Amino acid sequence: MTNDQIAAIVVPAIAAIGGGIVGALLASKAQKKLIRRNDKKFILAQLMGFRHLGSLADEFVTALNMIVVVWHDNTPIKQSLHRYLTATGSGQMFTAGQRLDALFALLNLMAEDLGYSLLHDDFNDFFSPERPTQQPPSNPDQPKQ
């Protein structure tokens, strides 16, 4: 075989292998970015979904504890989280308004990081159905026991 024949075989083979490796690395990086964005959206959705219950909901507490890991490289969000935690659990006296303002500031930064616009109305308006405190009236057609 001549050098030209070897080059005609080796160069395309190296290009194919190299292209495959580069493609796999780029796809892996894109996949990691997508997974991280989905994690951020999930945490924001959990916090928004349980904002009216706060620490009474295990899901809310779990989502709060995940912020430091998922937004590890976002200093403003981590600082806002610490301000909220200070407002809720330090033993200092904070009004409910200060606690809610700190929570809104945190959620707003998280939403901005995802490219969302969160308004105070979005934060303040939520659905929380009243739970019945009594048994519903019995069905008159139902036989008594």
Image (cartoon, rainbow, N blue to C red):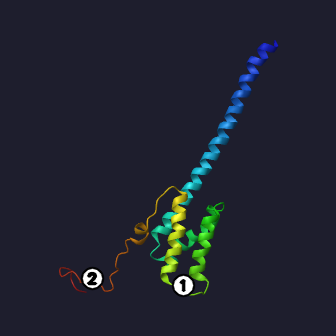
Q: Residues within 10 Å of mark 2 (few under 14, many from 20)?
A: few
Q: State the mark number for residue 136.
A: 2
Q: Is residue 67 above or below residue 94?
A: above
- 80 lies above or below 87: above
Q: Quadrant of the C terminus?
A: bottom left
- Residue 86, disc: none
Amino acid at circle 1: Phe
On the image, the x and y values in percent for residue 56 come to: 50, 79
User: Residue 100: percent from the left, percent from the top?
Assistant: 49, 76
Q: Report the quarter where the N terminus lies.
A: top right
Specify whether 29 is left or right of 108. Answer: right
Where residue 10 sits in the image (x, y, percent)? Answer: 76, 22
Q: Residue at x 64, y 45 (%)?
A: 28
Q: Real-space Cα distance between discs 2 and 1?
A: 39 Å
Nearer to the camera, 21 or 67:
67
Q: Nearer the viewer, residue 66 or 71?
A: 71
Query: Residue lying farthest left?
Result: 141
Judge whether 110 appears above or below 50 on screen: above
User: What residue does disc 1 label?
Assistant: 94
Q: In which image quadrant can residue 134 be found? A: bottom left
